[in-house]
Image: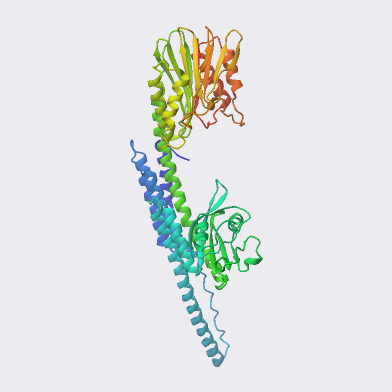
Amino acid sequence: MIFTNNIAYIPLFATAIVAGLILILLISVKHKKTAGVSFVLILSDLIVLCSSLFCAVKLSARRPPDGVYTFFISSICIAAFILIPYLIMLATFEPKENIKLVPPYVNKKARKALEEAKKQEKEEEEKKATELSQGDEALLNISRDFMVKSTQSFTEENGLSLLLDYINKTIKEEVKADGSAILLVDDFDDVITVKAFDGEFPPPYKLPSDMPHKPIRIVTNFKFASFALHDNIFGEIATAGKPELITKPELDSRIYQNGPEEFLECGSYIVSPLKVGDAVIGVIALSNNKTSALFTEEQFDLTNTLAGFAASAIANVTTVKDIIEHNEITKEAELATQIQNILKPAKLPVISGLSLGSIWTQNEGVCGDYYDVIPSRKDRISFVMSDIAGKGINSIVIMSMLRAMLRLVVNTKKSAGTILTWVNKGIAAENFIPDHFGSCALINYDPTTMTVEFSTGGTIPVYYFNCETNNFERISHTSEPIGVEKSSEYKDFVQKVKKGDIIVTYTDGVVEALNEAGQQYTRESLLRVISENCKSSGKDIANLVKADLKNFCGNLSQHDDQSLLIVKF
């Protein structure tokens, strides 16, 4: 949830107060020696206290500087990185058993033998403890390296790829595997994709039948492979969330034997999920060739431990990058919304013989609708309604191009269809912008002949209300959107009008607006309100539609801009 700068400092001050209270309690416990308190805990809490207090003060200023949120998030990550190795150490060390005292009634010879045995046992325990501590220290060093690499990845453009390569090679070397691969889950497409690959890894999936069995082709295929979350070893481990040691692949139905070449023969595999809490973000897969020794339980346990470290490091990078990307998108959307607000008419012009009304409701982060009223000549008044694909700056660029071209070309004597055809060629040629297309209706009205000439590209509808029959008729036709194909040509349509008739055009955000029950407002509701109030002015009709729409939707946020233009003669 994103707070505005006006109130964001409040939870930060609250965080600082809580962190300060925790700091006082930790110092009190350490002073009274009622329990062991590590300096690591105090340092982590102090970082949270200082960073939250600093950010709260900055955000409470009249003009808070940029980067406050990034600084706070980075501080929290640093505190976590300091704390995690310490907690891992506490979780992995085992307490020593209490040594029982020698009973006083045991004779000297037996006592001496017992003491020698205990001394030898103590030496062995100390030796074993030393060995364990060395192993734990090595694991802690790997964990620390993963975390350091993850922090370095925050500011690098391809930081995640570099981190995955480093983690993949490190685990491969520590486990002493022949090959390794990291695959990450794509929740949007429900697939798991290879993101890092190293060494020799006989593919446990069926290769394409037309693929030559050459090592370089097999490796290339594996490096860029994606798999469903079922019917293969990677997807099923990710779905189940449980690691597996496979020493007999020929008996596992999930593993396909591609042979007969020796480098394709499956040996043994370890596949361990990368889990953060209960969520699986991917898997680490290790392979030993057919000619190599089978993986052992010790290697399996080591892989699972390292997979836990790896998952935390990867999740930190993806989370921070998601936050940064979201902030950038939000800033871009805010800028696009401001530009969109500038492009629309400040107010509808007063035109003799016409009564105009409009609705234009922006939604946060959505910048697609544009309408215009252009009194170009005595015999031509042009009305524009458009809905541009995409969001943010890309849609604003297309919107600006469309507005500039139309305002220039409507001054000519060319028909609406010809003008849209020209505009389409100009926009379709600009292929440097993704999703550079949209729907548009151009309506030219000649007050000297009471004639409406119009043309549409895409799905923007144009409706004609006949005041004599009190009926609506859709007079537009769906066609190719503007900007898709340079060769598209748009047809002209003509409609004679009289006093009391109404022309209506709108974007789909109006009729597709939802209420809390998930029901759409619908075209029928829109046309009903207009028909029932056809005697009112264009402005009053638009206001009545807006009120009816508000009453239908309630306080539910909508997913699209809403634009409506009413022209009453």
Q: Decide if residue 279 is on the left or right side of residue 372.
A: right
**Which colour assignment does the render follow?**
rainbow
Seen from the viewer's position, the closer of residues 526 and 101 is 526
Residue 478 image position (x, y, % from top left): 55, 25
The answer to whether residue 26 shows anywhere in this view is: no
**What is the total number of numbered labels drawn onto the structure image?**
0
Return the x and y of residue 148 as percentages of the image width and height: 40, 59
Q: Nearer the viewer, residue 103 or 508?
A: 508
x 50%, y 54%: residue: 224
Residue 364 position (above or below residue 473): below
Is residue 6 visible from the viewing direction of this image?
Answer: yes
Residue 359 lies left or right of residue 521; in this view the side is left
Q: Quadrant of residue 466?
A: top right
Which residue is painted at 38% across and 51% down in the image?
A: 155
**Residue depicted at x 59% and y 16%:** 473
Going 43% across and 38% down the picture, which residue do you hit?
Answer: 330
Q: Can you give x and y, in whole percent of width and height, for residue 122 in the image?
A: 50, 81
Residue occupying the far bottom of the picture:
109
Foreground residue among 91 and 565: 565
Image coordinates of residue 414 in percent, x first then y, are 43, 17
Tell me: residue 76, above or below residue 56: below
